[in-house]
Image (cartoon, rainbow, N blue to C red):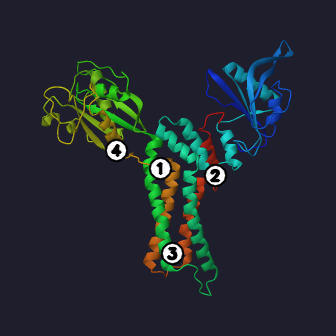
Amino acid sequence: MFSTEDTIVAVATPPGRGGLGVVRLSGPRALEFATGLITYPGPLTPRHATFTTIRVSTAHGGTEISRVVDHAVATFFPGPASYTGDDVVELSAHGSPVVLQAIVAAAARAGARLARPGEFTLRAFLNGRIDLPQAEAVADLIDAVTPLQAQAAFDQLQGTLTRAIADIDAELFDLVARLEASVDFPEEGYHFIEPGALVDALVQVRTRLTALVARGRQGRVIREGRVVALVGGPNVGKSSLFNALVGASRAIVTPLPGTTRDLVSEAVDIEGIRVTLVDTAGLRETTDAIEREGVSRSREAARVADLVVVVRDGTVPEVPAHCADSMYEAPSAPMLRVDNKCDLPGFVACAGALAVSAIEGTGQRELRMRIAGELGATFSGDCPEITNTRHLELLERADLSVGRALLAVQRAGGALSEEFVLADLQEARLCLEEITGRRTSTDLLEHIFTRFCIGK
């Protein structure tokens, strides 16, 4: 999987028809293979768009027939100043799948190999053009469905996480070097860092790691999204509120109780968070077998959701037998209570509930803010440096290692041997190196890059 000796080719634009389609070649023979496909008579000027036509050969009745299949723009990026670090040629043609596949097939007949998922970005990593967090950010940027997701991914692609990790690692490296120097001269009694200075330095490193971990836990919400379930009794307006939040009539709304009998879900952008919103069946006792199954699924949706929005009809007096909290087993997720129909006469909001109108739109802006707040994802200023679970877990391990070293030094009052502190600090550095890819297994690289699309 990790050979960079051959030349690879793939369609770099999404499947389907479009105005433009790009075929990308990368490797030592990329320019040779591309030149054989185009009719432009001269050499391609590096990083200049060259208008040409594409000529491919096909077998017909045992005879090779050469024919022009499309106009194209050819752009040559010599390595190492290219996306992958190798020679790269991109052929921009019309976005016809037939034409693009004909170009790829012609390149393959010339000797290019079909690229595997993520192989262009993998080569960029192996050639030192980007580090591992930047490579993962490429996939996150492609997969982004909200502006906040895209901004967080782009910031990481620009190196925000890399710089934060590098600063912490530089401090750890200095401490490790001083401690190792002390270990190298035990008889002379040299100590290249005093216990008090060591404690101060470890406190500073721990503070930076802890802050990064805290922001990373918020950042996971941006990258992974969350599930929010709307629950409540029949005819309280759950489906109307669902449609209002989605911005489309996805759920059926009628005056009849029990209209919603199955879960309806839709991905929406709420304050930059990708939220999977789930509309559920009204919670009530029923003899209808289908509705009873819907009620069962509603309770299950509340159990697994990250946030439960309990909707009540504010025009109906709340009595203990119908309190929202008693409709289902209390979920482990946080609960947000909403009283709907505040536009109607007789509306009375319960204490602690948010008054909204699914029809008039009253309170919906505040509801979105409250949902984001309950999910722990209210952001001001820059996006968190960390959104990736892998990075967060490794940072947490590094934080624990530095914490152990700090606690040991404080308890020993400076009498602890440097070897014990060194072991914890070196473990912390190994975690940081695994984040950046300086120390990464082949299995991990395969896991990361196989989730990329082909052509990227």
Task: Compare marks 1 and 2 and give the one earlier in the sequence.
Answer: 1
Tell me the residue that label 4 is attached to: 373
Residue 293 seen in the figure = no
Q: Which element is circle 3 on? A: helix
Pick the quarter of the image with the C terminus.
top right
* Residue at x-position 61% and y-position 28%: 14
Q: Is residue 379 toward the left or the right of residue 121 in the image?
A: left
Furthest-bottom residue in this view: 188
Mark 1 vs mark 3: in front: 1
Callout 4: helix, strand or loop? helix
Residue 65 position in % (x across, y down): 84, 16
The residue at which mark 3 appears reads as 198
Q: With respect to residue 307, does 73 lie above or below? A: above
Q: How far apart are marks 1 and 2 (CA)?
A: 26 Å
First in sequence, mark 4 or 2: give its number: 4
For badge 3, the amino acid type reads Leu
Q: Give the residue type that dot 4 points to.
A: Gly
